[in-house]
Image: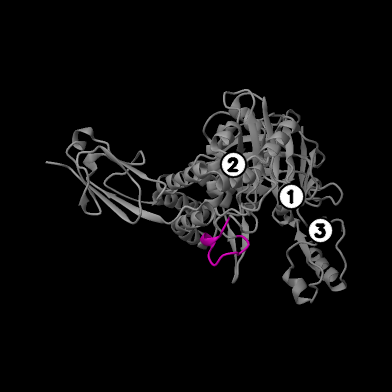
């Protein structure tokens, strides 16, 4: 049976005095027992105000106060404890346990976090199984304990490891008592095993021209939009996060995609290729499969044969899925976009390559302040994405070759973009998503809600910016508004979508709109007026190519 000891910090005044003395002497902070909670991190991007006031701006230094995480001592690890008796279940205050908000509690020995030589936080840049520590994890929802398990805990992230509030990974293994979790317990939906989760500190600060803004829940919002248009995305959920009993703030619990189990649970087998695409030198980190087939794909995409055709690409790559990936990045204005997993099912009927969206936390905000307003960001050439100049990612190579070499693909891409903007990312849908996350922010006690006003401006203005950029990069020409009006009794449809009695959308000349009368009993007598002029009455549908603003009015006949 586990023996656990919780000891409060009893050195408040020394904790306050030590940093002041060290700053005055210009010395680095080492490991001062019994206060392992203070730690130095050199060459970070943040200079504390105390250093600015003292004139020490030549050497960047951040002092991290880990008092809140000290004091937990776990003597051993017992994977047989019932969920309700785990330290992660018992240490959390009643207000957290009884909250109706989703809550994740993790308890780990303080030494495993803070020890100068072996602690996760003290060595946050270390990676791999050697930097995994045993922990207890409990998940509460609607005031009830849903699950409590043992897990391996690691620090998660790339550059975000420099942040004071760390992100973490959870690994479920037989070693800790459970080889996996049931996905439906956390995210709902189908019963599928999850063997790894990420607890994201999902706050991203945009360094603006006038003031800095903290953005919350960017990843979940971007993932929802991407999934809406057909992309493969991880499941996410905003949660309250407690570490060793202390509230860390609003976090986001995310299904981890860079593990073979993500595909095993979806494909039902393990005969697939999987690799992580995030790399500065263009190589991919192999998760499962063989290097040869990925190298062959890269070599093929760069081959000198021209022009590249849609049919040729679609034999090797799921072109619709790749197109949707690019549209998700373009729409969301995602910098640092070329991430995620590349995969191929080698045993199923469809063995083409496809990609999984991941890490879209630099969306909507123009992270590097490259445009006057975020929705005007040019993701094709901007810092972080640079779609037109990216020559080490097979997605960019294929896309750029097709947009330059294949008129057929340019028309296809424009048609797909029109479908997304007119029928999938509708104002009603987007207003619902933004409103829901704004209410979530209020529930989690987030004070500054200004980002949601920015988001509403973003989704209102981004489509027009994208249509303009299409002319620059895909030679689309201008776009024009189409308005369709008619009584609901006609059952009107535009592009195979029901519209009620009124519709408004935008089209390029090469992306015609299909307007159809869904009620066949009324179609034969219907009168079509295009810009006020009667046009071939009695037709059940029309396909209209726009060369200017167009109004279509459909009236029932006598």
In reply to whether residue 296 is colored magenta, the answer given is: no
Q: Helix, strand, or loop for circle 3?
A: strand
Up-down relation of residue 371 to residue 343 (above or below): below
In reply to whether residue 373 is colored magenta, the answer given is: yes
- Mark 3 — residue? 39
| Label 2 vs label 3, nearer the camera | 2
Task: Tell me which label, 2 or 3, sits earlier in the chain.
Answer: 3
| Residue 228 horizontal/vertical position (percent) | 48, 42
Query: CB of mark 3 within 8 Å of CB of mark 1?
Result: no
Q: Nearer the viewer, residue 143 or 261?
A: 261
Task: Tell me which label, 3 or 1, sits earlier in the chain.
Answer: 3
Q: Residue at x 21, y 40 (%)?
A: 489
Q: Helix, strand, or loop for circle 1?
A: loop
Q: Main secondary structure of the magenta part?
A: loop
Q: CA gap, disc 2 to disc 3? A: 57 Å
Q: Which residues are magenta?
A: 367-379
Q: Residues within 10 Å of mark 3 (few under 14, many from 20)?
A: many
Residue 94 seen in the figure = no
Residue 127 seen in the figure = yes
| Label 3 vs label 1, nearer the camera | 1
């Amino acid at each position: 049976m586990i023996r656990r000891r919780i000891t409060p910090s009893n050195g408040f005044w020394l904790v306050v005095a030590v940093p002041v003395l060290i700053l005055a002497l210009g010395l680095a902070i080492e490991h001062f027992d019994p206060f392992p909670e203070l730690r130095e991190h050199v060459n970070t991007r943040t200079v504390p105000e105390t250093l600015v006031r003292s004139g020490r701006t030549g050497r960047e230094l951040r002092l991290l106060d880990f008092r809140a995480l000290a004091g937990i001592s776990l003597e051993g690890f017992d994977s047989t404890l019932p969920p309700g008796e785990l330290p992660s279940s018992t240490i959390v205050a009643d207000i957290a346990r009884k909250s109706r908000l989703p809550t994740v509690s993790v308890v780990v020995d303080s030494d495993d976090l803070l020890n100068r030589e072996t602690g996760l936080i003290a060595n946050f840049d270390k990676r791999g199984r050697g930097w995994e520590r045993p922990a207890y994890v409990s998940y509460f929802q609607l005031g009830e304990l849903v699950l409590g398990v043992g897990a391996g805990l690691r620090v998660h992230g790339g550059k975000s490891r420099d942040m004071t509030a760390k992100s973490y990974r959870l690994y479920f293994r037989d070693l800790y008592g459970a080889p996996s979790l049931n996905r439906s317990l956390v995210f709902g939906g189908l019963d599928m095993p999850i063997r790894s989760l990420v607890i994201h500190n999902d706050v991203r600060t945009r360094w603006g021209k006038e003031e800095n803004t903290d953005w919350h829940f960017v990843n979940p919002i971007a993932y929802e939009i991407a999934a809406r248009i057909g992309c493969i995305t991880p499941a996410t959920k905003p949660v309250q996060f407690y570490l060793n009993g202390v509230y860390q703030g609003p976090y986001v619990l995310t299904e981890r995609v860079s593990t073979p189990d993500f595909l095993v649970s979806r494909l039902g087998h393990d005969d697939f290729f999987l690799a992580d695409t995030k790399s500065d030198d263009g190589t991919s980190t192999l998760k499962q499969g063989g290097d040869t087939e990925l190298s062959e794909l890269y070599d093929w995409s760069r081959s000198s044969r021209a022009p590249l055709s849609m049919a040729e690409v679609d034999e090797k790559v799921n072109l619709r899925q790749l197109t949707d990936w690019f549209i998700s990045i373009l729409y969301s204005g995602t910098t640092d976009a070329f991430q995620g997993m590349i995969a191929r099912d080698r045993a199923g009927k469809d063995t083409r390559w496809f990609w999984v969206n991941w890490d879209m936390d630099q969306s909507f905000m123009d992270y590097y302040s490259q445009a006057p307003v975020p929705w005007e960001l040019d993701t094709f050439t901007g810092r972080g994405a640079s779609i037109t100049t990216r020559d080490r990612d097979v997605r960019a190579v294929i896309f750029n070759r097709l947009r330059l070499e294949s008129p057929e693909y340019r028309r296809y891409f424009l048609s797909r973009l029109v479908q997304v903007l007119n029928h999938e990312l509708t104002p009603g849908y987007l207003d619902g998503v933004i409103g829901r996350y704004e209410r979530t922010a209020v529930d989690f006690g987030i004070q500054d809600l200004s980002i949601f006003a920015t988001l509403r401006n973003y989704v209102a203005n981004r489509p027009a910016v994208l249509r303009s950029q299409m002319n620059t990069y895909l030679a689309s020409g201008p776009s024009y508004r189409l308005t369709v009006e008619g009584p609901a009794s006609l059952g009107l449809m535009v592009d195979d979508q029901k519209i009620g009695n009124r519709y408004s959308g935008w089209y390029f000349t090469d992306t015609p709109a299909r307007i159809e009368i869904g009620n066949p009993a009324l179609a034969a007598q219907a009168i079509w007026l295009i810009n006020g002029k009667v046009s071939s009455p009695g037709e059940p549908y029309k396909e209209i190519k726009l060369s200017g603003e167009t109004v279509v009015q459909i009236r029932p006949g006598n």
